[in-house]
Every structure is written in structure tokens, then in C-alpha cells.
Image (spheres, helix red, strand yellow):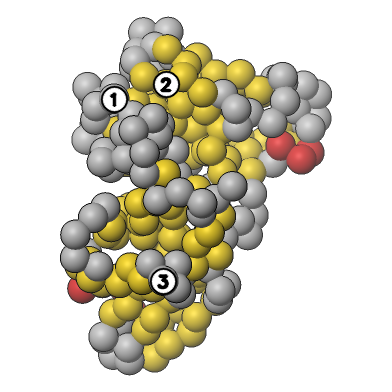
Amino acid sequence: AQSVTQLDSQVPVFEEAPVELRCNYSSSVSVYLFWYVQYPNQGLQLLLKYLSGSTLVKGINGFEAEFNKSQTSFHLRKPSVHISDTAEYFCAVTLNYGGSQGNLIFGKGTKLSVKP
Amino acid sequence: GAGVSQSPRYKVTKRGQDVALRCDPISGHVSLYWYRQALGQGPEFLTYFNYEAQQDKSGLPNDRFSAERPEGSISTLTIQRTEQRDSAMYRCASSGRLAGVLETQYFGPGTRLLVL
């Protein structure tokens, strides 16, 4: 079975500091990887995804993530955060095979709190 | 509208009552997914549709839960004889073509269900 582990439930950080949100996954088959963000009172929004190719993926709002197959990780990074980045971030995977239906398996989420 | 909408946004009900949660996907989207998110957890897959056909309901927790999408557009998730453990955020997502990992899932704002 597949699973996603987000190692930090909460990450406080000061504005303009760098941040890394960690994500590890477990799967016996190849997967695609995603990061979603949820702002207060809004739905989940896709930040970025890794399907194939370059292991460094750039997303919206200055975020990027790097797929590391040997470490089964997909950590999310931003070099300088803003107050507006305060939100909950979810890492997710879906199976990479022809019959996959595309349903997402999510981690428990990491709450990023950016302080002035 | 431009995005996925869900109604009601909040629902408070008494144990034993039936509830119906509605999802209106992005116009023209073929695939529709339902997820449930308990407090402090990530979303968990419940079921999904391609057009009006329910392709997979393996995530539905028991036979009190059912879903339909009779005309291939709006979907309703029904919970019969609600129990307190059903309290959660229920999320709907839609994607453009047949369910597949290359299609981004767009999420609605969710319905917060509280069973007293």
C-alpha cells in the first residue's frame, strides 16, 4: 500500500526566511507526486507536481520541490517566505501505471505559519 | 461559476438524520472525486465518477454512504443515519478528461459536517 508522511505538523518561520516542508512516501510501484496548499476557508490548490523528467519542479508563488527517488522524498522549499504563505500544505501521491484512476493519497498536512 | 462549488458549506445535524452534500464540478469536467478529511488529517479518497458512472467506491466507509452523479455533472454524497464519527470536512474535486494522473484535480471549498 502507498502512504505519505509529512514529518512536521507545524512549521513556524519568520518572514523572508527560507523554509522547507518535508514529505516522504512509501510505494511498491512508481508514483506521481504533488503538493497542494489550502488557504483559510478555501479549497485545496495545486502548487506543483512531479510526473517525469527533471527532478526539480517549480510551482506557483515561488515554491519548488525536488524528487529524490533513492530517499523517496519530495520536499517543498521556498527561499524567502511572505506572510501570505501562511497556510496548510499537503503532499500527495498517485499511482503511476496505466490503470490508475488518479485518486490522490495525502499526507496529514503541515501548517506553515509566517511571522512578521 | 469558474470553479468547483459545494453546498452547503456547513451542515449541523443530529445523530440518526440523513444528510445530502452537493458538488457542482467545473463545467465540462468528466471526472469527479469525493474525499473526506477528518480533523488533523489529510483528505482520504471516498469514490469517483467518470461521467455518470461510479468507477470506484472502495473508499466509502460503510453502506450508509452513497454517491450519485445521474447526469454526469452535479454529484450528491448521501450519508444515512449519521453518526458522530461522520463529522468531517467533505471535499469534492473534478478533473478535465477521463480519470488519469496527468489531469489536475480542482477542489471545491468543502462541506464541514458536524453530527451532534
Q: Would residue A39 be visible to someone looking at this image?
A: no
Q: Nearer the viewer, mark 1 or mark 2?
A: 1
In the image, residue A24 above or below residue B63: below
- Looking at the image, residue B85 sits to the left or right of residue B102; the answer is right
- The C terminus of chain B lies in which quarter of the figure? top right
In the image, residue B18 above or below residue A31: above
Q: The residue tagged with tag 1: helix, strand or loop? A: loop
Question: Which residue is disc 1 drawn over?
Answer: B98
Q: Earlier in the sequence, mark 1 or mark 2?
A: 2
Q: Residue at the location (42% across, 12% down)?
A: B53
Query: Could you tell me the amino acid type at mark 2?
Result: Phe
- The N terminus of chain B lies in which quarter of the figure? top left
Contact between labelled residues 2 and 3, with CB atoms less than 8 Å apart:
no
Dot 2 surroundings within 10 Å: few (below 14), some, or many (20 or more)? many
Per the model, the C-alpha gap separating discs 1 and 2 is: 9 Å
Q: Nearer the viewer, residue B4 or B68?
A: B68
Q: Quick check: do tags 3 and 2 share a chain?
A: no
In the image, residue B89 above or below residue B21: below
Q: The residue tagged with tag 2: helix, strand or loop? A: strand
Query: Could you tell me the amino acid type at mark 3?
Result: Ser
Dot 1 surroundings within 10 Å: few (below 14), some, or many (20 or more)? some
Q: Would residue A51 be visible to someone looking at this image?
A: yes
Q: Which mark is residue A70?
A: 3
Can you give x and y, in whole percent of width and height, for residue B114 in the image? Answer: 68, 40
Can you give x and y, in whole percent of width and height, for residue B49 in the image? Answer: 42, 21
What chain does mark 2 sit on? B
Q: Nearer the viewer, mark 3 or mark 2?
A: 3
Q: Residue at the location (36% across, 44% down)?
A: A96
Contact between labelled residues 1 and 3, with CB atoms less than 8 Å apart:
no
Q: Residue at the location (47% across, 16% down)?
A: B54
Q: Residue at the location (69% across, 41% down)?
A: B87
Question: Which residue is disc 2 drawn over?
Answer: B49
